[in-house]
Amino acid sequence: MLVEALLALAAAGGGAIVQAAGTDAWNGVRSGIARALGRGEEAWEQRELERLDQTQAALDAATEGELERVQTAQAAVWQNRLEMLLEELPEAQRLQVAAELRAVIEQGSVDGKGQSVHNDFSGSTFEKSAVQGSGTQNNTFN
């Protein structure tokens, strides 16, 4: 089971992907996420690049009325992928990948001209990559 900080990191990563799509930050975020998920395997990295391109296409195709729903869905998909990656890695690799993800998120924020992802978890428990409990979770995508 992942600790709260890593779950929050995965959530921030999912949000960073969605926020970077269509901006100057996209290429850096796209390649950094694919590299982290590919873990040195060129074929895996290529598949992740294709998945990221599908995300950008879905966001580009969304109408104004459905954009928020599509953004939320895509952020959740990538959050889940990142959680699964972090959960499967041995501790030493997990720490390395977490550092890589933080750098990608920070790069996206800087390149994206101040866009940010903010997660507040209050009174929640984390089990099997889900937020459970009577607390609140606020995800803000600026």
Image (cartoon, grey):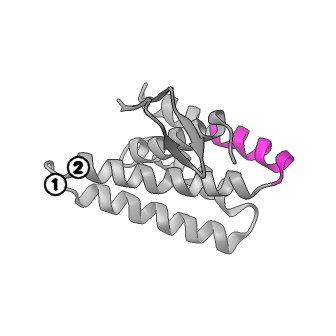
User: Contact (CB < 8 A) between labels 2 and 1?
Assistant: yes
Residue shown at the point (57%, 71%) measured from the top left: 47
Horizontal side, residue 123 vs residue 70: left or right: right
Quadrant into which the C terminus falls = top left
Q: Residue at x 51, y 41 (%)?
A: 11
Residue flagged by tag 2: what amino acid is it? Leu
The residue identified by callout 2 is 67
Between 52 and 2, the residue placed more toward the observer is 2
Which residue is pictured at 60% across the width and 47% down the height? 127
Residue located beneath label 1 in the image: 63
Q: Nearer the viewer, residue 5 or 112?
A: 5
The residue at the far right in this view is 92
Instruction: Give residue 135's position: percent from left, percent from top.
Output: 44, 29
- The amino acid at mark 1 is Thr
Please provide the residue range marked out in magenta: 90-102
Please say whether residue 106 is one of the residues in the magenta stretch. Answer: no
Residue 110 lies, in percent from the top left, at 51, 28
Q: Main secondary structure of the magenta part?
A: helix
